[in-house]
Image (cartoon, helix red, strand yellow):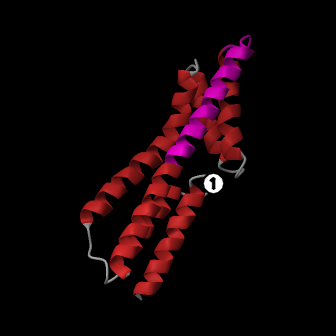
Amino acid sequence: MDTLLLIVGLILMILGLIGSFLPVLPGPTLSWFGFVCLYFTKTVEANYWVLGITFLITVFITVADYIIPAKGTKTFGGTKYGVWGTNIGLLIGLFFPPIGFVVGPFVGAFVGEILYNSKDTNGALKAAFGSFIGFLVSTFMKFVVCFSFLILYIYIAVKNFV
């Protein structure tokens, strides 16, 4: 049973790493469940500090993943309309994976800014670009967290199983 849990945990870690790039898969959440599988084995002693800290990191990254594209829009000069457009575009993009996750917030920010000021297409493009930069930043953060979780998983597994 320990071997099965170890393999399932590793698969979840790898899926989490892939999920950091594919918004369809909740990358950090899958990686965290990989830790849970590891700590369910009899060989690895339960360490609630590791599980608790990684859980908090997972929650933070998951929430930040939805906030950062909107903050990117705001940072690049977007208004409330652009921020709302980014969030609405992200929700609509969920129905058109995988390209919808990238295009949805961009188009949403652009449309929101055009609704606010139809004469400032340059400003609308700038805000939409900010949304895209925010998406790249959040994707990079998820990748770093999932990769760190994978390295920690391998370290704990090797230390306890070898």
Along the viewing direction, whichever of 88 and 140 lies nearer the viewer: 140
Magenta residues, start to end = 117-142
Give SS at disc 1: loop
Q: Is residue 18 magenta?
A: no
Residue under the image location 71 percent in, 39 percent down: 103
In this image, 53 relative to 25: left or right? Answer: left
Find residue 5 and report its horizontal and vertical position in percent: 44, 81
Q: Is residue 87 visible?
A: no
Find residue 7 and report its horizontal and vertical position in percent: 49, 79
Q: Is residue 129 magenta?
A: yes
Give the residue at mark 1. Answer: 22
Along the viewing direction, whichever of 45 and 23 lies nearer the viewer: 45
In this image, 76 relative to 124: left or right? Answer: left
Residue under the image location 46 percent in, 41 percent down: 64
Residue under the image location 55 percent in, 38 percent down: 137
Instruction: Relative to 59, say whether 6 is above or below.
Output: below
Residue found at the very far top of the displayed protein = 119
Instruction: Relative to 25, say whether 5 is above or below.
Output: below
Residue 116: image quadrant is top right
Residue found at the very far front of the displayed protein = 162
Residue found at the very far bottom of the displayed protein = 1
> Please, what is the three-letter code of the amino acid marked with disc 1?
Leu
Find residue 145 and report its horizontal and vertical position in percent: 46, 52
Along the viewing direction, whichever of 46 and 105 lies nearer the viewer: 46
Q: Is residue 153 visible?
A: yes
Find residue 61 and report its horizontal and vertical position in percent: 44, 47
In this image, 45 relative to 156: left or right? Answer: left
